[in-house]
Structures are given as structure tokens and as C-alpha cells.
């Protein structure tokens, strides 16, 4: 149980995926042949760590992984295809291929199928990640076999550091904006023109004005944060780039 399989081929499995309201069989050969693929496996869709950290960070770093030779990133869980599709929509994970290992065959073949009956989950995948080249596992990061749900080594940043320690992750950018604000449009255009992705918090939809004041100390929009640092408004962003 929880043994590494570096140098071995991935299990030969046919997955039942759901595409355009129909079941479509997808084989491991289709997923891995002649490709460099990252797989990260987790206990369940919609669960806290999986939704708040594991999946989102791989989605955020997908562009950097692609620049470093990765063709696809697969998120695998012992859930059914309906659940995985709903989770993908909820997470807006357009950069990740979510695969339902509904019967646990792939996880069992990886020696990663564990019993989580104490949580009412039944058999689930242990949390791990791996780099697969042309169907052969080059590297695995397996979480420690301890109680609970450890999340220390299967994260996206650990995988990126393995693939290329000199790779530079994208900046974490948040923009607090308001509909119809020309200064917000200016700030967002500056970011887009530089190819920088950002997370937008819209006042009136995602938060109230009181939240804006509490976070930035200001009631004007936009308010911009980069890598945890407070930048300010659109003019401040222009100064930051110049």
C-alpha cells in the first residue's frame, strides 16, 4: 500500500467519462501515449483541501507547466463522472482534465486505493501526484501514510520545482472593481495587455463596499493587490509597471 511505482507503466484502465450528455470511454492510452502528463489524485470532489488548494493551484500554474513541456494535467478521484463534471464547473478549472475513477480501478492499480469508511466515503484514492512520460511514471510525490488528510508534497508548487526549479510562477493578482468604473477597465486592460491573469472581486456581487474599506482602507475602485502586496488604484498600478 502507498508504494512508489516510478519507472513503471500506469495501470491499463478504461474510464467512463461524461461528455455532451453521453458516456464516453477514455483509455489510459489515449490520456498518456506520447505525452508528458501530470496526474494529481485526491480523496474527493468538493472536499475542503481539494477545492481550496489542490485543484486551484494546479489550474493557476497550468500555463507555467505548459511552458515547461507538460501537455496535460489530470485530476483523478474515485467519484462518478457526474460529480467530477459538476466540480469542474464549480471550480472553473478550464486548464485541468478531470477524470472520474468511478470503480477505483486506476487507484487500485497504483496501490493508492484506501478505505475511508470512517468518513462514509468507502474506498477512495490516497492523495498523491506524479509526472508521467509516454505512459511511464517518472516521479511520484505521495503524502505520508498518517491519519487524516495530509497535504504536504503532492501540491503544484512541489511538482513545478521538480520539473524546473528555476521556473517562475505567475503573479497572484486580485482586482476589486465595480461595474461601469472606467478606472477599473483601465487597470484590467493594463493587466490583460501584459498577459497577466487576475482574480476579480466585484463590489455589489462578490462583496459589499464595507468589505472594500476594511480590506484596503479606501472606498474607491479599483483596488489592486499583487503577490499579497497592496498596490492601490489604476494610477498606482501604472506606476508599479513603470
Image: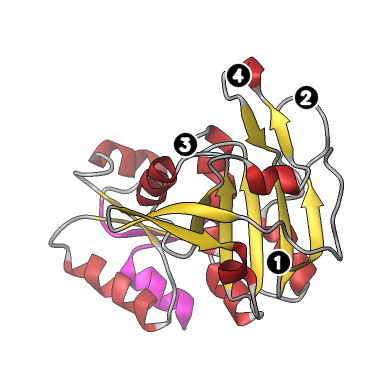
Q: CA distance from mark 1 to mark 4?
A: 32 Å
In the displayed structure, does residue 176 sit left or right of residue 30?
left
Which comes sooner in the sequence, label 2 or label 1? Answer: 2
Frontmost of labels 4 and 3 is: 4
Figure check: 182 above or below 144: below
Q: Which residue is mark 2?
A: 147
Mark 2 element type: loop
Mark 4 element type: helix
Q: Are marks 4 and 2 in contact (CB under 8 Å)?
A: no
Q: CA distance from mark 4 to mark 3?
A: 14 Å
Any mark on residue 119, and which? 4
Q: Which residues are magenta?
A: 220-242
Which comes sooner in the sequence, label 4 or label 2? Answer: 4
Asked whether residue 241 is drawn in magenta, I would say: yes
Q: CA distance from mark 2 to mark 1?
A: 27 Å
**Residue 26: percent from left, percent from top:** 50, 61
Q: Which residue is mark 1?
A: 160
Which comes sooner in the sequence, label 1 or label 3? Answer: 3
* Mark 1 Cα-neighbour bin, 10 Å: few <14, some 14–19, many ≥20: many
Which comes sooner in the sequence, label 4 or label 3? Answer: 3
The answer to whether residue 170 shows anywhere in this view is no
The answer to whether residue 127 shows anywhere in this view is yes
Q: Residue at x 65, y 64 (%)?
A: 38
Q: Which residue is mark 3?
A: 46
Classify residue 165 by image quadrant.
bottom right
Figure check: 113 above or below 55: above
Q: Are marks 1 and 3 in contact (CB under 8 Å)?
A: no
Figure check: 173 above or below 46: below
Q: Residue at x 41, y 64 (%)?
A: 198
Frontmost of labels 2 and 1 is: 2
Q: CA distance from mark 2 to mark 3?
A: 20 Å
Amino acid at each position: 500500500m502507498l508504494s512508489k511505482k516510478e519507472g513503471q507503466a500506469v495501470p491499463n484502465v478504461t474510464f467512463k467519462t461524461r461528455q455532451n450528455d453521453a458516456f464516453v470511454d477514455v483509455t489510459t492510452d489515449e490520456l498518456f501515449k506520447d505525452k508528458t502528463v501530470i496526474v494529481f489524485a485526491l480523496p474527493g470532489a468538493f472536499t475542503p483541501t481539494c477545492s481550496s488548494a489542490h485543484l486551484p493551484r494546479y489550474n493557476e500554474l497550468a500555463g507555467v507547466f505548459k511552458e515547461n513541456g507538460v501537455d496535460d494535467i489530470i485530476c483523478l478521484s474515485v467519484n462518478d463522472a457526474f460529480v467530477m463534471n459538476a466540480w469542474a464547473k464549480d471550480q472553473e478549472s478550464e486548464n485541468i482534465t478531470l477524470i472520474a475513477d468511478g470503480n477505483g480501478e486506476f487507484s487500485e492499480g497504483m496501490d493508492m486505493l484506501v478505505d475511508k469508511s470512517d468518513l462514509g466515503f468507502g474506498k477512495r484514492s490516497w492523495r498523491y501526484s506524479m509526472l508521467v512520460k509516454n505512459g511511464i511514471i517518472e516521479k511520484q510525490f505521495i503524502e505520508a501514510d498518517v491519519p487524516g488528510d495530509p497535504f504536504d508534497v503532492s501540491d503544484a508548487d512541489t511538482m513545478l520545482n521538480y520539473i524546473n526549479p528555476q521556473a517562475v510562477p505567475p503573479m497572484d493578482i486580485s482586482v476589486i472593481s465595480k461595474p461601469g468604473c472606467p478606472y477599473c477597465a483601465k487597470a484590467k486592460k493594463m493587466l490583460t495587455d501584459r498577459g497577466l491573469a487576475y482574480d476579480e472581486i466585484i463590489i455589489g456581487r462578490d462583496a459589499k463596499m464595507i468589505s472594500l474599506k476594511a480590506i484596503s482602507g479606501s472606498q474607491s475602485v479599483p483596488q489592486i493587490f499583487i503577490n499579497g502586496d497592496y498596490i492601490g488604484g489604476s494610477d498606482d498600478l501604472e506606476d508599479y509597471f513603470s
